[in-house]
Image: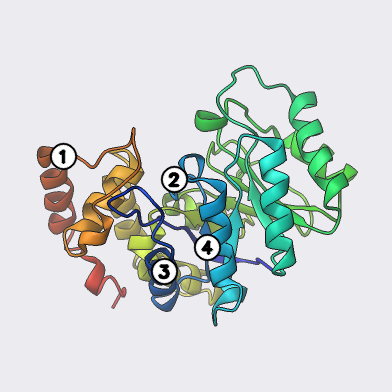
Amino acid sequence: MISRGIYSATCSIINEDYSLNVEATIDHAEFSIKNGLHGAIFFGSTGQSQLIDLNSKKDLISKIANHKLKKKFYLGTGCNSLKETLDLIRYAYEYDFKEFLIMPPAYYKGNTESGVYNFYKHIIEKMPKIKIILYNFEKLSSFLFTPEFVKKLVVDFPQNIVGVKDSSYNLFQNLKIKNFLIFPGTEAKLLDGLKLGCSGTISAVTQVTHSLARKVFDDFEKKKEQSHNEKLIAVRKTFDKHNLISALHSYFSVKEIKFKNILPPLVLLNDKDKKDLISELDNLNFEISKNEAA
């Protein structure tokens, strides 16, 4: 079961024909875990979940079902269709995956609390044994979870709603629920969140900052002096100047060509922005091959 720690919203590796490279996607998640992460979540926003077809998601699920790191792999759904969301959950459940990061359906604006409540209620009624991490990301879903609404969901579904990823950053400072996981969606808020009782972070950029973020987390747990948080925040802010999917794939593609494809309408950074990204990271004396926080 997902617990306190540092997790990535892992990238999806895309082939030239825009199909999902399942093996490479799994290998990338494994690399991040071996370099410090407590786990990796497939098919979050950075995993291009809204753009990847259901069959490809199922293919990956079947491949990780017997993986040695299965207990460190978690799943987002990334489907706008309620039927497809349930279809994917049922399929994953058959492979003993029971925890899911679920965002309310995107695209339509004006989502209401009653509508979003019914969305989660229906999922839980159909799959009563699963655990759900709510995904608070108003920018993508056009819905902002309030502390009061999260509390209502937890009260009504205490066995199912176990945590939240807060990428709108209106919850992690104010939400207080006993035995409830709260993950700010950026490592820039990792330490502040931990001080407030949060559980760690689920972040796209931890695929790059894995060792630094893990060091900050471990030092906090051991009550040691913090000496890496400033650099961790600076690296994250450098990526935040760009679309994260574009920036991460552009950064990784410098050394690994398999990252050069992303799904339309997304594109890699243009040459200038890519050069600026690399230059700023160089000025921070940061590169992924040595971000072990030595």
Q: Residues within 10 Å of mark 3 (few under 14, many from 20)?
A: few
Q: Residues within 10 Å of mark 4 (few under 14, many from 20)?
A: some
Which residue position holds label 4? 60
* Residue 293 appears in view: yes
Q: Residues within 10 Å of mark 2 (few under 14, many from 20)?
A: many
Name the residue type under label 4: Leu
Q: Nearer the viewer, mark 1 or mark 4?
A: 4
Q: Which badge, 2 or 4, is on the more N-terminal residue?
A: 2
- In this view, 243 is above or below 229: above
How far apart in space, not on screen, are marks 2 and 4 (Cα)? 14 Å
Q: Nearer the viewer, residue 59 or 261?
A: 59
Element at badge 3? helix
- In this view, 149 is above or below 191: above
How far apart in space, not on screen, are marks 1 and 4 (Cα)? 32 Å
Q: Nearer the viewer, mark 2 or mark 1?
A: 2
Q: Residues within 10 Å of mark 1 (few under 14, many from 20)?
A: some
Q: Which mark is residue 91?
A: none
Q: Which badge, 2 or 1, is on the more N-terminal residue?
A: 2
Q: Residue furthest top?
A: 110
* Number of on-image labels: 4
Q: Which mark is residue 48?
A: 2
Which residue position holds label 1? 273
Element at badge 2? loop
How far apart in space, not on screen, are marks 3 and 4 (Cα)? 8 Å
Q: How is the image coloured?
A: rainbow
Res 113 → quadrant = top right
How far apart in space, not on screen, are marks 2 and 1 (Cα)? 21 Å
Q: Which badge, 1 or 3, is on the more N-terminal residue?
A: 3
- Quadrant in the picture for the N terminus: bottom right
Which residue position holds label 3? 23
Q: Residue at x 28, y 38 (%)?
A: 242
